[in-house]
Amino acid sequence: MIDADALATALNVMSLDEGKALIDSLDGFEAYWVIKDSTGNFLTESSSNMPIVGGL
């Protein structure tokens, strides 16, 4: 659990591209981002190895 908490903290201070690169370089980790853009809309992004289920 501590590894996941540290990784989540790191992802919060990285750019999206940096975060994706980090997650993609680690075995056994996946990530899903919900990002609020400058107009107030929410965007979603996921790491390349994240299975998207249920039309998210």
Image (tube, rainbow, N blue to C red):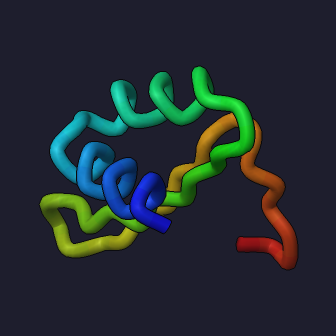
Farthest front residue in view? 2
Q: Is residue 41 above or below residue 35?
A: below
Q: Residue at coordinates 85% horizontally, 78% vertically from top-left?
A: 54
Picture coordinates of residue 31, whole percent (x, y): 56, 53
Q: Position of residue 10 (x, y in %)?
A: 26, 44
> Is 49 left, or right, of 53 in this rendering?
left
| Residue depicted at 25% across the width and 55% down the height | 9
Residue sitting at x 71%, y 72%: 56
Residue 55 image position (x, y, % from top left): 80, 73
Q: Would you place residue 28 above or below residue 37 in this image?
A: above
Q: Quadrant of residue 33?
A: bottom left
- Relative placement, left or right, of 26 versus 18 is right
Pick whichever, 3 or 45, lies toward us. Answer: 3
| Observer able to see residue 43 | no
* Residue in view at x 31 percent, y 72 percent: 41
Q: Give the x, y percent position of residue 40.
A: 20, 74
Tell whether 37 sits left or right of 16: left
Left or right side of 53 for 28? left
How many labels were placed on the picture? 0
* Residue 8 in sight here: yes
